[in-house]
Amino acid sequence: MKLLAAVLPLVLLAAPASSEVVSAGANGFVIRHVAELPAPPQRAFAAFGQLPRWWNPDHSYSGKAANLRLVLAPGGCFCERLPGGGIEHMRVALVQPGERVVLVGALGPVLFDAVAGSMDVRFIAGTAGGTRVTMEYKVAGFANGGADKLAPIVDRVLGEQLRRYAGFASAR
């Protein structure tokens, strides 16, 4: 109970300041989430790389966050081990430690469509030594003409992940 009382204020401070489906159409969408963290940019960046510690395992193929990894280096993999195989969720395209990570790939249900995705995560120094984290995910391609229907679902999942990340990064 003491731990909950200590961590809850940090999680509330780290709650996303905004979340939205910026645009959505039959063949693509743009989602943006923003969170304010009481942690400095370098610490926020390092926490982002500890994906198995904050990603909800319900949004994985294996059901186990321990099977996930994110290598914060160019060409690094956001991958998941599966029995006898695995999956590459995204590939790291750009790393600027403490500032920015860009990943490319199609998450979740859009993996099986002919789409490309780009997730741009920025860590911007804020007031009082904190960090504003902005996550923008753009998806475009065939998507069976139903990307606009997937956008709110992907938005909810990524919003949950960013809240979990923000709580984890704030409590460190």
Image (cartoon, rainbow, N blue to C red):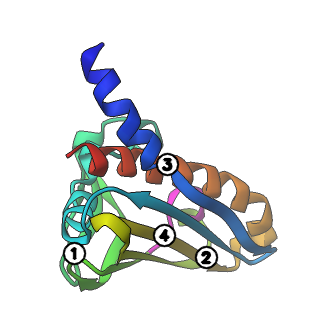
Q: Position of residue 133 (x, y in %)?
A: 42, 68
Tell me where residue 131 appears, x and y as whole percent. Answer: 35, 67
Q: Which residues are magenta?
A: 105-110
Q: Amino acid at mark 3?
A: Ala
| For residue 73, above or below residue 172 | below
Q: Categorize mark 2 by other alpha carbons within 10 Å: few (<14), some (14-19), many (20+).
A: many
- Per the image, label 3 sits on a secondary structure element best described as loop
Q: Which type of secondary structure does the marked residue at label 2 adopt?
A: strand
Report the residue marked by disc 1: 76
Sooner in the amino-acid sequence: mark 3 or mark 2: 3
Q: Secondary structure at mark 4?
A: strand
Which residue, given by chain and number where applicable, does mark 2 sit on?
139
3 or 1: tag closer to the N-terminus = 3
Q: Residue at x 52, y 64 (%)?
A: 34
Taking 90 as reference, is 60 above or below it?
above
Tag 3 residue: 15
Q: Quadrant of residue 76?
A: bottom left
Q: CA distance from mark 4 to mark 3?
A: 13 Å
Toward the top, the furthest residue is: 1
Q: Nearer the viewer, mark 3 or mark 2?
A: 3
Q: Is residue 107 left or right of residue 77?
A: right
Front tag of 3 and 1:
3
Q: In which quadrant of the rendered view does residue 121 lie?
A: bottom left
| 10 or 151, nearer to the observer | 10
Asked whether residue 130 appears in the rendered view, the answer is no
Mark 4 residue crowding within 10 angstroms, few (<14) / some (14–19) / many (20+):
many
Mark closest to the chain's N terminus, 4 or 3? 3
Identify which amino acid the numbered label 2 is placed on.
Val
Mark number displayed over residue 135: 4
